[in-house]
Image (cartoon, rainbow, N blue to C red):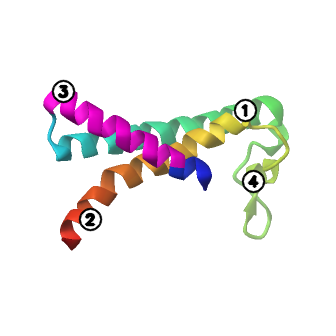
């Protein structure tokens, strides 16, 4: 949770600076942030698959081993996927929050 909060703060500061320095509109910055969120999410998914296939190929499957649990989910907290890969996924959430919250606040005014 802390990573999402810090990521949201840092991305908001960067977004404001980029908006001022480059002269972009708020909607353009929001689109850039949404694009960044998509890229971070896709990188997260690709890297999770990559590390599981490389370090635990027997678990690199979407088959359910237990009802409601796929094989790859059993790799959680085993150190197979580096923590920085998970941080990328959390930063994608931060980018979405940074892109959407200003619009919600503007609608509520």
Is label 1 in contact with label 4 (beta carbons under 8 Å)?
A: no
Is label 3 in contact with label 2 (beta carbons under 8 Å)?
A: no
Taking the spot 64% from the left edge, 36% from the top edge, the residue there is 85
**Residue 90 on the magenta segment:** no
Q: Is residue 51 left or right of residue 59?
A: left
Q: How far across and how far down the image is residue 50, in percent?
A: 67, 32
Q: Nearer the viewer, mark 4 or mark 2?
A: 2
- Is the residue 62 above or below the residue 23 in the image? below
The number of callouts visible is 4
Tag 3 or tag 4, which sits nearer the N-term? Answer: 3
Tag 4 or tag 1, which sits nearer the N-term? Answer: 1
SS assignment for the magenta stretch, majority: helix
- Say which residue label 4 marks: 73
Q: Is residue 102 left or right of residue 2?
A: left
State the quadrant of the N terminus. Answer: bottom right
Tag 2 or tag 4, which sits nearer the N-term? Answer: 4
Rendering quarter of residue 26: top left
Is label 3 in contact with label 1 (beta carbons under 8 Å)?
A: no
Mark 1 surroundings within 10 Å by alpha-carbon count, few (fewer than 14), some (14 through 19), many (20 or more): some
| Residue interval drawn in magenta | 6-23
């Amino acid at each position: 949770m802390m990573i999402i909060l810090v990521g949201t703060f840092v991305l908001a500061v960067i977004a404001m600076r980029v908006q001022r320095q480059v002269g972009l509109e708020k909607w353009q910055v929001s689109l850039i942030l949404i694009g960044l969120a998509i890229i971070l999410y896709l990188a997260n998914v690709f890297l999770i698959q990559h590390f599981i296939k490389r370090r635990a190929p027997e678990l690199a499957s979407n088959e359910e081993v237990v009802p409601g649990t796929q094989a790859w989910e059993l790799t959680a907290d085993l150190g197979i996927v580096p923590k920085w890969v998970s941080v990328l996924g959390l930063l994608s959430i931060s980018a979405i929050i940074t892109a959407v919250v200003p619009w919600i606040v503007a609608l509520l005014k």
